[in-house]
Image (cartoon, rainbow, N blue to C red):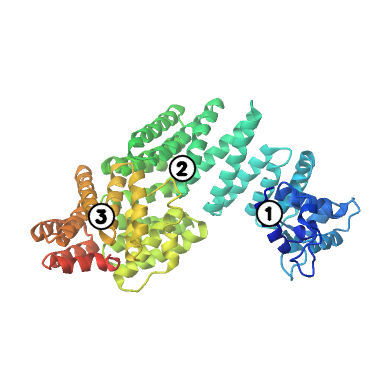
Amino acid sequence: MSLPHLRCVLAWSPHSPFLSKKFGLRESRGDSATRAPEEIEIPATIQEIVAARLDHLRPAAKRVAQVAAVLGRRFGTEILSALVAGERIDVRAELAELERAGIVHRKNTAGADDYRFGESFTQEVAYDSLLLRERRDLHDRIGERLRNEDDRPLASRHAEVGRHFARGNDPERGVRTLLDAGEEAEALPSYGDAIRLYREAWDLAENALDEAGRPGRELQRGALRAALRLSNATVLYGATHAATDDRAAERGIRLARDLDDTVALARLHASRGMFVMNHGRERFEEGLDLIREGYAIARAAQNDYAVATLMRALAFSYLLDGRFADAERQIDETLDELDRLGQGEKLSDTYMGARFFRQRVLYESDRLVEAEAYGRETHRLAVRVNNRTLQSSSASGLAAVCFVTGRYEEALDWADEALRIAGEIENVGALRSASALRVLARAAHGDGPSRPADTETMQRGLLTSGDLAINIDLIVSALIVTGDTTRARKLAEIAVERASGRLREARHALALADANRAGHEGDLSCAHGFYEHARALGEQMGARSVRAHAHLGLGELAAVRGEHMIARRHVTTAAELFDEIGFVHYATRARRGLVASRRSPREIVEATRGSGQKRV
């Protein structure tokens, strides 16, 4: 250990019972040593310091610390006593000794039976001091006891049981238990917990596959199940970790081929196709080809349910690319197929999910009246069968319709309902969109500042997620309204970089243009370029709302530059397009732009940039 490191350790040691005793510091003062530094034998690492401290304990106390470490950083005396039963150890007396030594602490004064290790590395050193075989045996014993005696909810209990089995003598059993826990969490539903458990199961399964060299069929089946569950959940509920989840789907495809599981093979092709699409515009067609391949596999296997599921994935791909007629045709065929299979009569999750997607296609096609009517019916059916996922998603979709049509109180009501339900079940996609719509509707309604919780929720996981939704422009607009133009621009830049599919690319281009136009540090020439790009894409797709937004932005930019004739031309076109499709909110803003185009450039700069955070 170098002299600076030694000085650092000695400086810190008065605050640590471990180091105070190791280095001979007087307990009464804590700032002077009973031995000179040169007389002190310095361990090479902090781990060795902790290990030396544990070795100085009496054997029974050290044994209690080791077994407690297998339980985790927090542990209870009841299960700890059961694990050392027959070893003639007074657990409470040894815990008192460990507490005096600063190794463990009572969790709180009221709960004397609950303890925790003071530092995580203390627990790790105590854990590592056990032989591997003994650790595995203890994990198995703990898993069995928790499974049979724990009275916690099933999902959380199975999660902890699975983690112990995973580190025991049978990792495959751990994978199975974690997957069971994930499925229970998904059924509640609690999607965040489900995805975390699926991801944990996959990580464990992947490690087991790597270590096995030539894995058995049972391990391969467990790993395939983990890959399938993780891929499906992250695609559906919007919480992907792009690199990890893409790797899981890719390896899952190889496992499905090895196990000759054509249904899993088809579904994993679709999931991987969605992940690939999130890697940027240059990989969109590659992702679409993967989904088509999965669809062909399902067709060849004559598995009707898998075919219907893959048809929905194809419809979503077409929507991302602004192929509205193809998307509607594909989702209508999906619903017809599900009706034929009896799923419509049951109002199954898959059928309801397809209904919500049709609501989304109608909205993105600028058919607001149809989208609202269909969305209200979908919401009614979701309430009838207590499908909270679709209740929150359809409510968020209805909030969007109400906002763009200028019905702000209704928009707030739907957004609040979506947030309440989506928060309970961790439906991330609905949480993001409903939070953004709440911010925008409050601002448009003149209800004052938004809640900090809304701005945090609408960005939840966006910068780390592999999935940036079509409606990222809503979130960017909401950030601009709150005055956070720097974050709005950062998010929009990342969105443009990842954009794939013409509709998503156009929406993200509009978001970046708006962010550049709104902030004092924005680049107006950059904004102009992205508005023009979005306008061109809108014309290719026949997307009137995209064209209208682009014209509005170009008109407002021209007004800032004092180019009044150009400004009036663009803003007039925007107003006419918005009127055609019933976007009352934006049509009103366009007419305000017509008035603004007659003001001086200096007045316009102050109105559109200096107070840009007030504009919705």
Image coordinates of residue 417 in percent, x first then y, are 43, 64
Q: Nearer the viewer, residue 107 or 334?
A: 107
What's the CA distance linking mark 1 and mark 2? 30 Å
Q: Nearer the viewer, residue 239 or 49?
A: 49
Q: Secondary structure at mark 3?
A: loop
Q: Secondary structure at mark 1?
A: helix
Which mark is on residue 120? 1
* Residue annotated with mark 3: 523
Image coordinates of residue 333 in percent, x first then y, are 34, 40
Question: Quick check: 29 above or below 372?
Answer: below
Q: Residue at x 63, y 45 (%)?
A: 178
Image coordinates of residue 181 in percent, x first then y, are 62, 48
Q: Amino acid at mark 2?
A: Ala
Disc with the residue nearer the chain's start (2 vs 3): 2
Disc with the residue nearer the chain's start (1 vs 3): 1
Q: Amino acid at mark 1?
A: Ser
Q: Nearer the viewer, residue 401 or 337?
A: 401
